[in-house]
Image (cartoon, helix red, strand yellow):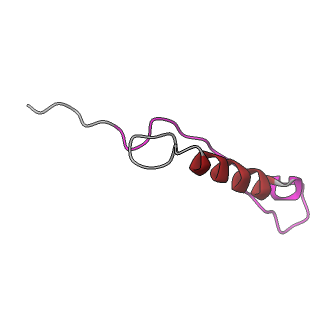
């Protein structure tokens, strides 16, 4: 029996980027995309992306 492999990522961060077309409140109306893009940029800048890393 082989040992289980390490997960591809150590951590996950989830962002709701939902956009409702019917006018109801949604995450997209509250800068969710900007928050997602900023977080992704910061993770890469800190060298935390890629196999076995945070994101």
- Vertical order, 19 against 52 (above or below): below
Q: Quadrant of residue 46?
A: top right
Question: Residue at the spot x=81%, y=63% of the render?
Answer: 20
Q: Measuring from the top left, give residue 2's x and y in whole percent.
A: 12, 33
Q: Pick the residue in front: 38 or 14.
A: 38
Question: What residue occupies the far left of the structure in this picture?
Answer: 1
Q: Position of residue 13 (x, y in %)?
A: 60, 41
Q: Is residue 24 magenta?
A: yes
Q: In the figure, is residue 6 to the left or right of 23? A: left
Res. 4 image quadrant: top left
Residue 54 sits above or below residue 35 on the image: above
Percent across and percent down for residue 24 are: 89, 58
Main SS class of the magenta portion in the image: loop
Count the marks: how many? Answer: 0
Residue 25 is left or right of residue 12, and the answer is right
Pinpoint residue 47: horizontal percent, then vertical percent: 52, 45
Q: Is residue 3 left or right of residue 18?
A: left
Residue at 51 percent of width and 40 percent of height: 54
Residue shown at the point (65%, 53%) measured from the top left: 41
Q: Quadrant of the N terminus?
A: top left
Residue at horizontal 78 percent and vertical 62 percent from the top = 19
Q: Is residue 23 left or right of residue 45?
A: right
Please check the rendered image and state whether residue 20 is part of the magenta-colored stretch, yes or no.
yes
Q: Hey, which residue is sitting farthest bottom in the picture?
A: 21
Q: Which residues are magenta?
A: 7-30
């Amino acid at each position: 029996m082989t040992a289980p492999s390490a997960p591809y990522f150590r951590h996950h961060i989830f962002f709701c980027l939902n956009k409702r077309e019917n006018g109801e409140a949604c995450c997209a109306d509250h800068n969710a995309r900007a928050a997602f893009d900023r977080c992704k940029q910061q993770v890469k800048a800190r060298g935390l992306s890629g196999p076995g890393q945070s994101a």
